[in-house]
Amino acid sequence: MSDKIPFYRRLIYSLIIILFFFGSIELIFRLYDFKFYFNFSADILSMPLVDMCRLRRIANRSVEFDSELFWKYKPNQIISAPELFKEPIRINNLGFRGKDFQIQKPKGVFRIICLGDSVTAGFGVGDRGTYPAQLEAMLKRLYPDCAVEVINLGVTGYSSFQGRNLFFRLGEKLKPDLVIVGFGPNDRMPALNSDREHYQIGTWRKNSLDLFLSRLQIYKLVKAGVIYLKRRSQGLSLNPKTYVPRLKR
């Protein structure tokens, strides 16, 4: 009788060893709180070395993918990140900062919605420190006999394109009496492609495999390394003839 191990068993043993090896690395990264996170925005800009401990958009527990908005906060959560906020912040029932609110406007209420980026969302400040929260408090002091509601629809990293999509998805349903819009740096960040172009080509449409891989630390590290080597070989080149018009849009 031959003592030779059958091929299929050798194949299975090899796969087990490979899975154990990479699984051990993944576990070590997670146990030691490995702070290297790949960011899909960085992929777009070919900037792989993004520390998501400071830039929390994708591949963490507080946000999720969205085919139209690209990303959004997960509703009903408390985000505790001392390096980002002075105190824990609350994400309400509809996935925005501040107290819970209903889509149907209460009778007799003057409703204001604030669309914007991290400035509106209140990056770095507590729930009472955002300008929509302060605006509501100020209006209630000045007009105590009036029912005023200010809703913060700002999301960190949003551009005017995302804000427009958010307004047509939710803003109109809120039936606001006043809309305040504030977008700035994020409109010029995707200089290689505008958000409109990314939407058309489906950059942010992630399938189940993409979502699974995006949660693996090993995948993020390997993909970032590939992008880094690619960027080193290509360099950065922005043609003013295409770059300037995109900024204007």
Image: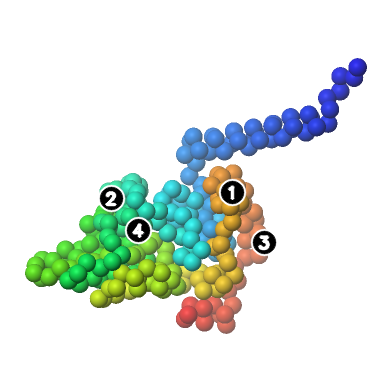
Residue 133 seen anywhere in this rendered image of the structure: yes
Separation of residues labelled 3 and 1 (CA atoms): 26 Å
| Kind of residue at disc 2 | Lys
- Residue ID at (50%, 41%): 34
Q: Position of residue 106 (x, y in %)?
A: 22, 67
| Marks 2 and 4 close (CB-CB < 8 Å) | no
| Kind of residue at disc 4 | Leu
Q: Label 4's element?
A: loop
Q: Which mark is residue 86?
A: 2
| Kind of residue at disc 1 | Leu
Q: Earlier in the sequence, mark 3 or mark 1?
A: 1
Label 3: how many residues lie within 10 Å, few (<14), some (14-19) or many (20+)?
few
Q: Position of residue 175 (x, y in %)?
A: 29, 73
Can you say whether 175 is above or below 19 in the image? below
Q: Earlier in the sequence, mark 2 or mark 4?
A: 2
Q: Which residue is mark 1?
A: 213
- Residue ID at (56%, 45%): 216
Q: Quadrant of residue 48?
A: bottom right
